[in-house]
Amino acid sequence: MNHRALIIGGGLAGGAAAARLGRLGAASLLLERETAAHDKICGEFLSVEAERHLAALGFDTERLGGARIDTIRLHAGHRRAEARLPFVATGVTRRTLDAALLDHAAMLGAEVRRGVTVRQIAGGRAVTAEGSVDAGALLLATGKHELRGQGRDAAGVIDDLVGFKQFFRCTPALRRALAGVVAITIFDGGYAGLQCVENDRLNLCLLVSRDRLKAVGGAWPALFAALLKEPGLALLADAEALLARPLTIASVPYGFLARPDAGDPVWRLGDQAAVIPSFCGDGMAMALHSGRLAADMLAGGAAAADFQARLRGDVGRQVRLATRLQRFGTSRLGRFALVAGLGAVPAALAALARWTRVEPAALARAGA
Ligand SMILES: Cc1cc2nc3c(=O)[nH]c(=O)nc-3n(C[C@H](O)[C@H](O)[C@H](O)COP(=O)(O)OP(=O)(O)OC[C@H]3O[C@@H](n4cnc5c(N)ncnc54)[C@H](O)[C@@H]3O)c2cc1C
């Protein structure tokens, strides 16, 4: 019997769990299917809570050279609202961040094996192409989509959105227009986020309903051309796209929250445990929080169900509120009401940004 923890997935949840177990002197093996650092669909808005978790793991975010973000700008048609964020965030690519966290976890003693895909979990073992791996505890951190045999209850989730992400070269004019800003454009059938990241790049990440995508013919060039008519995105008209084609994702179960199950020995981390709507920019903090908490509770002898209950208590309210807001904000009436209301009362924008984040009390309990 192997007593070390097996972590499946080397995103931020898996990386945080491996790093924290290493700091606690506990052995872990992490399996990541990608062979090297890679781009991911993400707005790459790293919240202050996420940075606090990383700092508590001994990880220095500053050295990654991300862009500082202290202002949120909302656009809906010609309406626009802007407010100072109640914190300073960072724009940093997942290619850089996730790989650096895995290196950090390895430096702290975790064994990180890349290029290994877990096909399923059967009989408490992880099945890979090279055979099955057994473990003292199984931590599932594979992100948005299901691993075979580990389906999630999709009742009540929003899963009709398709995500796209493209990088653009950040010219001096674009830098001036977007310095310090995360710009959110709410459009018919979805929303887009635009911000600077490291190495003079702009990240455009958006979610669009399948219906709207179908209405423009189902392909990115037509969708992008339609979105350039939005005043909040028109500045990208002459921008140079840096990826040959955008990254895409579909069927993300927004609003999903794992329920504790005393009969289930698997520890569910990150997006496997809770999927918060992307506009909140706190999914990464939740993933890090879950990884850290799982490591602490595992080392303390807790059961998976106790961890799942505690995590649900820490993030459930934010996920439910953000999911209701996403439904309202992407309705025709909602998107104008939201921008008009928040434009009139900028403090409400800052309050919303606060309410949809991991609570300070939960962060403090986790030692971040
Ligand atoms: C469109 C969009 C925009 C977003 N924007 C933001 C944002 O701006 N800010 C923010 O904080 N959050 C954002 N999020 C949320 C954030 O990206 C996620 O919450 C976060 O990545 C979850 O981390 P994770 O570790 O659970 O999963 P992931 O980051 O998805 O990592 C999972 C890892 O598991 C690996 N893996 C998967 N299957 C297997 C397998 N079978 N075997 C081995 N390895 C496997 C994958 O390769 C991957 O590296 C956004 C999400 C979306 C969809």
Image (cartoon, helix red, strand yellow):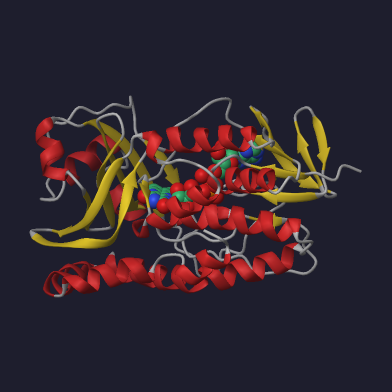
Above or below, 243 relative to 17:
above
Name the one closer to the observer, 51 or 34: 51
Q: How many numbered markers are drawn?
A: 0
Give residue 137's position: percent from left, percent from top.
78, 51
Q: Quadrant of residue 104?
A: top right
Picture residue at 61% right of the left edge, 38% below the top: 105
Picture residue at 51% right of the left edge, 33% below the top: 99
Q: Can you say which quadrant of the picture contains the N terminus?
A: top right
Picture residue at 16% right of the left edge, 44% below the top: 178
Give residue 148's position: percent from left, percent from top.
69, 47
Name the one closer to the observer, 121 or 20: 20
One can see residue 359 in this view:
no
One can see residue 50 in this view:
yes
Above or below, 156 relative to 80:
below
313 displayed left or right of 281 = right
348 displayed left or right of 364 = left
Give residue 294's position: percent from left, percent from top.
66, 57
268 displayed left or right of 329 = right
Q: Quadrant of residue 14?
A: top right
Name the one closer to the observer, 160 or 127: 127
Give residue 333's position: percent from left, percent from top.
20, 72
Name the one closer to the observer, 170 or 248: 170
Picture residue at 7% right of the left edge, 58% below the top: 78
Above or below, 214 relative to 315:
above
